[in-house]
Amino acid sequence: MKKILSSLIILTMIVSSFSAITFADAVVEKLGGARPKTYTNYKDLIDDPDVDCVSIMTSWDTHVDLAVYAMKAGKPVAVEVGGAYSVEDCWRLVDTYEETK
């Protein structure tokens, strides 16, 4: 359970504000774990071998690029509803999935 929670906190810290980092630190401290890793850009997060999968919950205009990068890095990807703005971007996601599965 602690490993799962630690992974969720890492994702929260990527997409949230400083207050979320402070909250995450408090939760981990309460559970007796180590401070989660933080990243300054998505490529460092996705390229980290300790990251098993990527869940994308960012603004719509970033979904496709993030998902394509993560799939090409060999990570399973979940994108929130509204994965792309256009049919072309949807096909880009499908094509990348087919190339990397």
Image (cartoon, grey):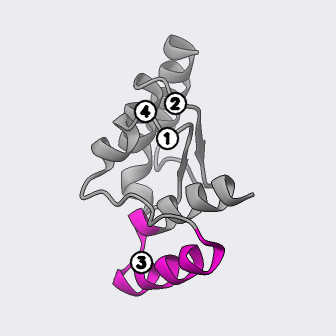
Q: Name the residue under label 3.
A: 21
Q: Residues within 10 Å of mark 2 (few under 14, many from 20)?
A: many
Closer to the N terminus: mark 4 or mark 2? 4
Q: Name the residue under label 1.
A: 51
Question: Does residue 1 appear left or right of residue 19 in this picture?
Answer: right
Closer to the N terminus: mark 2 or mark 1? 1
Question: Does residue 9 appear left or right of residue 81 in this picture?
Answer: left
Q: Mark 4 points at which residue?
A: 49
Check whether the beta carbons of the residues at disc 2 and disc 1 lie within 8 A of each other. yes
Q: What residue type is labelled 4?
A: Pro
**Against 84, is 52 above or below?**
above
The label nearer to you, 4 versus 2, is 4
**Against 87, is 19 above or below?**
below
Q: Residues within 10 Å of mark 1 (few under 14, many from 20)?
A: few
Q: What element carries label 2?
A: loop
Q: How crowded is mark 4: few (under 14 residues within 10 Å), some or many (20 or more)?
A: few
Observer-nearest residue: 25 or 85?
A: 25
Closer to the N terminus: mark 3 or mark 2? 3
Q: Mark 2 points at which residue?
A: 75
Separation (CA) of disc 3 from disc 2:
24 Å
Q: What element carries label 1?
A: loop
Q: Is mark 4 on a helix, strand or loop?
A: loop
Identify the residue at the far right of this view.
Answer: 1
**Quarter of the image where the C terminus is located:** top right
Q: What residue type is labelled 2?
A: Lys
Observer-nearest residue: 94 or 32?
A: 32
Image-quadrant location for residue 61: bottom left
Picture residue at 61% right of the left edge, 81% below the top: 30
Observer-nearest residue: 87 or 98?
A: 98
Image-quadrant location for residue 7: bottom right
- What is the span of residues highlighted in magenta in the rendered image? 13-32
